[in-house]
Amino acid sequence: MEINYRGMREDSEAALDRLLPRIHPRAPRDNLVRNVDELCLRYHTLGVASLLLDGHPRDFFLALGRAAENWRRLLVHLRTRGERLPPATSHTPLLGAVAASHWELARGIVMASATERQADIDEYEDDFDWALLLQQLIAPAERAPGRTEALITQLERSGADTYGERLEVARTLQGHEAQAFFDAFEQVLLAHEEQTEELASKSTTPFERFAPYRYLWLEGLALLRLGERAGFTREDRIRYCPPLARLRMHVPIDEDWLIPLAS
């Protein structure tokens, strides 16, 4: 699969100009979710293109932050209107916030995210349980001792086979075991590599949604940030997690290209 990131960047800039005027507080729920979801995808495309083509980590982190803040605003707005939230498994903007070390923003997304599985739209139990555990790892619930262990146990029941490698990552974060964390991370990386290369070889893979994440792994970057927060460091090269994307760089989110929803 050949990817023209320059062309995709131009397309995404044009799409943002088209999308932003469509997003207003009184828009129907489904339109809001669809448009903000595409908005986040376009921001990620811009950020990845800036990183891979130009070597600009600041633009990459800014794009991740903008996407995450827009997603948070959507969640808060839907809660305020009493409408159904996107499923918990729609957490790519959250992963981006963590990858960019926007911890308070990530906490805000977690606090506003869905906590009930939406089985009617085929949100599978194991995927949902991992999403909940990931939320807990990112922003541990206050006054809820034992919640992380309970969520690990829950995922062991529903996804011991499908999420076994990620379960081990969660356990090592809890145990503060640096080498065990990186050993477990390597197993998640191998599984991601196999899935990614398989998708890249298929003509049926949705191109626009896959392309930003072909060579950059947001979940992997987020897991590495969780390890970093726990005191685990690793300086060697990691496939799909380029060094520029792992820099310790705080990039404030400006007011440009933010949607006019409840903040």
Image: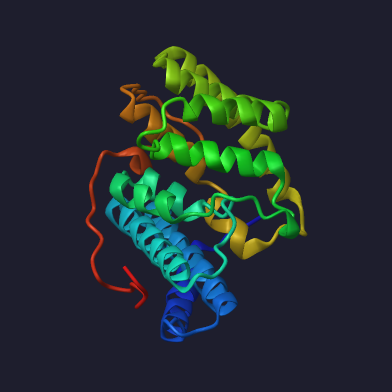
Screen quadrant of the C terminus: bottom left
Q: Is residue 34 left or right of residue 180?
A: right
Residue at 50% in and 70% down: 82
Pick whichever, 160 or 80, lies toward us: 80
Pick whichever, 167 or 145, lies toward us: 145
Is residue 167 depicted above or below 257 in this figure? above
Residue at 72% in and 53% down: 119
Residue 43 visible in the displayed image = yes
Q: Is residue 61 left or right of residue 214?
A: left
Q: Residue 24 in the image: state x and y as whole percent.
A: 42, 83
Residue at 58% in and 57% down: 211
Screen quadrant of the N terminus: bottom right
User: Which image quarter: residue 163?
Assistant: top right
Q: Residue 69 in the image: state x and y as whole percent.
A: 36, 61
Q: Residue 197 in the image: state x and y as whole percent.
A: 68, 42
Pick whichever, 59 or 130, lies toward us: 130
Q: Residue 155 in the image: state x and y as whole percent.
A: 64, 31
